[in-house]
Image: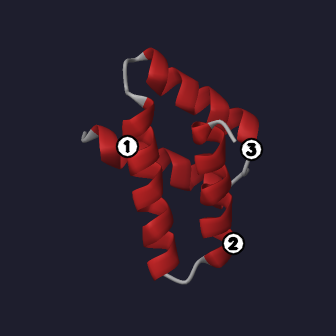
Amino acid sequence: MDVGAEIQRKVLAITEGSRDFGEIRTLLGGWQAEGIATERLIDEVTDLMLDLRAQNREDDEDFVADVLDVLAGW
């Protein structure tokens, strides 16, 4: 499976489900421990956010934007 697609799929599943930031942080940390660069994670999550925007899913887009803030260390 394409790593980018897996990242987007798993972040979307949490977005549509629990919206648990603890779960998001664990997921992101796991990918970083596997050697996936933070920049790659930011790119994939940004692509997901833009897809959600194109689908007029504002609440989901806002949550994913918050995930990006976590990634960027804001």
Q: Which residue is mark 3?
A: 20
Q: Residue at x 55, y 84 (%)?
A: 56
Task: Give the SS element for disc 1.
Answer: helix
Q: CA distance from mark 1 to mark 2?
A: 22 Å
Q: Which mark is residue 55?
A: none
Q: Which residue is mark 1?
A: 6
Q: Is residue 27 left or right of residue 70?
A: left
Q: How many marks?
A: 3
Percent position (x, y) of residue 63? 67, 59
Q: Residue at x 67, y 66 (%)?
A: 62
Q: Which residue is mark 2?
A: 59
| Of marks 3 and 2, the one in the foreground | 2
Where does the N terminus fall, quadrant-wise? top left
Q: CA distance from mark 3 to mark 2?
A: 15 Å
Toward the left, the furthest residue is 2
Q: Judge whether 29 appears above or below 48 on screen.
A: above
